[in-house]
Image (spheres, helix red, strand yellow):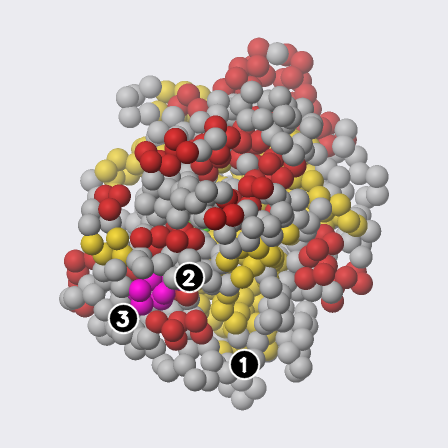
């Protein structure tokens, strides 16, 4: 979603301002020596071509069995395309020699009996149950064989599985959203409008094919594998929180089921061919008017609501549609105490969202499962670490809000390649039991994973901040647990990705503002505060352009609880101060702001960076860049930098950080999207010759008052003319059918 919409910080904890840690390091000669030792070792290791550091912190955590971390993927030494210029035009620009075409747009029919999309708000609500959803986001290509089974090497037929994070409600309806009243009394009045909105959220599974004759891609409207998972789809609650009292609703008095998934942002996948969709800003969809509901709740419930933002009228006002149905289609969005007990209302419903949800795309009848062992927060995604036979599996997650944390999940079970064909049963084995960790980034360039385990450290029933009852309570309230153990507040963790060449982990920190990253709260891993520019007459203070952090764990990633980090790239305008803002030396060919989507190609090892920006949009629409990263510590002697930040009051502060090698021509802009869009979600065919990229919410900022006048729409992409804009998947190929970007 637009990064201006969810600028919420609900993190009141005092942790993670690394100020104290920095002061400690500077005053403590012993710690300074440790830092110097690690930095030097890192530089030497890199120059010598050694893949993994033997720095002090990592040596303490030496792996018992040193399996190779990468998949053996190779990276080219140079990118093979000419950079695309910045652009404000309402088109998709790609390099010379490439083609980009819309493939799967909002409203496109996904079953034989569904009519073509009229795109004027009059398409029948019921038909949306089998139309492409809105706000395309994370996407994964799963190859399929001739029998429709998962095939890891099929590059001409497959399933695209993608998220539909949110909606641009105005363009869904004939004349925008119909509602009455104001404030807490605002109400939706047209059931068909609400039903459409229920359907266009969630996930699409859609079969795609490449024509043998001309190489053109199309989706198969009548495939038996096409499926929509949306806010009405029944889902099982799985793992430690299943059956917990905090999951009980009228729909599932046992606390083992819930209906729907919402705000599906980033995602991930498993080695057994299932898709992981993640529930990001779920909290805002529920109605809970604090003034009347707070007196009815326990202190622990209130702590949960405050920390997760469950308060308000609900962003789409779904709970207000009346009359309600017998199965509470609308009332289930009301998280207030209404009945006599939890099994008689939906007071707990928000606890059934905020999870990683597993979907088996090759089994359209399968029930999705919310995998609670991975914790509950504004889950941005779940990115798999290296898959090593005989070792546990690893997934990384970000919590996308300003000042939130980065997490790592490690399965209890060791990976058995024979499970690669077991579908959801493999999910039960690997995703329902494991350790959940949260990251702490130290000022000396090291970091640690702190386990969130009931009974360990301060996560006990006698904790005075929050008296945890059991592991389910820790997982449901993962943010509170992470506060307590001292995790590092980050500049809005968006996507992560694991480098197939060396197993290092990258994560975008999309941006932060002055209020939530003031000078006093700068730390080594989030070191910038400056005035980027004026957009719409408003100064942008804070870390408005964002950065990409990366880290390197020990050889055995499943066992590693320490890592070494640096900052791979800082977003910036090319002309900004190279000492303190444009620290990666970006140029006109690769300057960007607010990195959001992030993904590594397994075919080429290229790192793809997507933006969701509001700070550089006076100059350019959002974009996609290709990059050839090196390795943690590749900034060499220049890696340790002191960054001077200045705030709006003219105060300054210096913070030491660690910066990767300058971008140079190893980072190039590959694509610029249409007006008011965000570029998010990218996947490829295994041969690397086709990229699928999602364009989300073109024209999003069109004022509702302009819906009646197409000449005033903020975008007409992709259909052109006077059409309403549509989120869409585009397919990118090279005109000579070559591998993309090399
Ligand atoms: Fe949905 Fe994290 O942006
Ligand atoms: Ca975003
Ligand atoms: Ca995002």
Residue 29 seen in render = yes
The disc placed on residue 223 is 1
Mark 3 vs ligand 1: CB under 8 Å? Answer: no
How far is disc 1 from disc 3 in space, using C-alphas?
26 Å
Q: Is residue 195 magenta?
A: yes
Q: Is residue 552 left or right of residue 668?
A: right
- Most extreme residue toward the front is 340
Q: Are marks 2 and 1 in contact (CB under 8 Å)?
A: no
How far is disc 2 from disc 1 in space, using C-alphas?
33 Å
Q: Which residues are magenta?
A: 191-198
N-term mark: 2 or 1: 1
Quarter the C terminus occupies: bottom right
Secondary structure mostly seen in the magenta stretch = helix
How far is disc 2 from disc 3 in space, using C-alphas?
27 Å
- The picture places residue 297, in percent across and down from the top left corner, at 44, 33
**Relative vertical location of residue 199 with respect to residue 410 in this rendering, above or below:** below
- 731 or 468: nearer the viewer: 468
Residue on which disc 3 sits: 121
Residue on which disc 2 sits: 326
């Amino acid at each position: 979603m637009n990064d201006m919409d969810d600028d919420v910080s609900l993190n009141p904890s005092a942790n993670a301002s690394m100020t104290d840690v920095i002061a400690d390091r500077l005053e403590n000669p012993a710690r300074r020596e440790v830092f110097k030792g690690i930095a030097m070792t890192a530089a030497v290791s890199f120059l010598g071509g050694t893949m993994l550091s033997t720095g002090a912190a990592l040596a303490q955590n030496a792996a018992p069995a040193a399996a190779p971390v990468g998949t053996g993927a190779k990276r080219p030494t140079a990118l093979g395309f000419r950079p695309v210029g910045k652009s404000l035009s309402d088109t998709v620009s790609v390099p010379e020699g490439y083609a980009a075409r819309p493939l799967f747009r909002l409203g496109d029919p996904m079953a034989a009996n569904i009519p073509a999309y009229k795109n004027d708000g009059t398409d029948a609500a019921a038909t949306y149950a089998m139309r492409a959803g809105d706000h395309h986001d994370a996407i994964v290509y799963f190859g399929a064989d001739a029998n429709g089974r998962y095939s890891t090497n099929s590059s001409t037929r497959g399933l695209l599985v993608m998220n539909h994070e949110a909606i641009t409600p105005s363009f869904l309806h004939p004349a925008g959203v119909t509602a009455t009243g104001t404030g807490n009394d605002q109400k939706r009045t047209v059931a068909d409008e609400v039903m459409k909105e229920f359907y266009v959220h969630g996930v699409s599974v859609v079969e795609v094919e490449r024509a043998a004759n001309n190489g053109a891609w199309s989706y198969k409207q009548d495939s038996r594998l096409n499926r929509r998972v949306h806010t009405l789809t029944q889902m099982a609650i799985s793992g430690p929180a299943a059956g917990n009292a905090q999951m009980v609703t009228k729909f599932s008095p046992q606390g083992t089921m819930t209906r729907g998934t919402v705000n599906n942002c980033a995602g991930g996948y498993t080695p057994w061919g299932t898709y992981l969709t993640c529930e990001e800003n779920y909290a805002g969809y529920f109605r809970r008017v604090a003034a009347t509901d707070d007196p009815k709740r326990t202190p622990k419930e209130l702590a949960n609501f405050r920390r997760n933002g469950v308060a308000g009228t609900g962003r789409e006002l779904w709970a207000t549609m009346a009359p309600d149905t017998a199965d509470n289609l609308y009332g289930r969005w009301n998280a207030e105490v209404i009945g006599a007990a939890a099994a008689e209302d939906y007071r707990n419903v928000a606890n059934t969202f905020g999870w990683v949800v597993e979907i088996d795309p090759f089994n359209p009848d399968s029930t999705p499962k919310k995998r609670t062992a991975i914790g509950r927060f504004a889950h941005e995604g779940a990115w798999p670490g290296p898959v090593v036979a005989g070792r546990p599996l690893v997934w990384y997650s970000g919590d996308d809000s300003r000042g939130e944390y980065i997490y790592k999940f490690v399965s209890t079970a060791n990976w058995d390649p024979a499970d690669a064909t077991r579908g959801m049963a493999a999910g039960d084995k690997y995703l329902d039991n494991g350790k959940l960790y949260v990251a702490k980034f130290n000022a000396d360039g090291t970091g640690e994973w702190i386990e969130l385990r009931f009974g360990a450290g301060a996560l006990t029933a006698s904790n005075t901040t929050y008296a945890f009852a059991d592991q389910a309570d820790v997982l449901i309230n993962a943010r509170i647990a992470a506060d307590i153990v001292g995790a590092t507040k980050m500049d809005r963790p968006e996507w992560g990705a694991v480098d197939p060449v060396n197993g290092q982990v990258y994560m975008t920190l999309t941006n932060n503002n002055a209020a939530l990253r003031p000078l006093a709260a700068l730390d080594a891993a989030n070191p910038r505060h400056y005035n980027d520019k004026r957009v719409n007459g408003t100064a942008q203070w804070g870390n408005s352009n964002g950065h990409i952090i990366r880290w390197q764990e020990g050889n055995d990633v499943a066992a590693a609880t320490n890592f070494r980090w640096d900052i791979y790239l800082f977003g910036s305008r090319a002309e900004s101060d190279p000492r303190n803002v444009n620290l990666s030396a970006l140029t006109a060919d690769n300057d960007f702001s607010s990195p959001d989507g992030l993904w590594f190609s397994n075919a080429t090892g290229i790192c793809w960076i997507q933006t969701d920006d509001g700070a550089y949009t006076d100059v350019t629409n959002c974009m996609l860049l290709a990059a050839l990263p090196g390795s943690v510590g590749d900034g060499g002697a220049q890696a340790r930098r002191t960054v001077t930040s200045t705030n709006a009051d003219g105060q300054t502060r210096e913070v030491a950080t660690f910066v990767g090698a300058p971008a140079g021509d190893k980072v190039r802009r590959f694509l610029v999207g249409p007006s008011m869009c965000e570029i998010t979600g990218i996947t490829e065919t295994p041969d690397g010759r086709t990229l699928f990229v999602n364009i989300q919410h073109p024209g999003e900022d069109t004022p509702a008052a302009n819906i009646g006048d197409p000449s005033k729409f903020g975008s007409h992409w992709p259909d052109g003319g006077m059409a309403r804009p549509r989120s869409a998947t585009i397919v990118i190929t090279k005109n000579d059918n070559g591998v993309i970007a090399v």
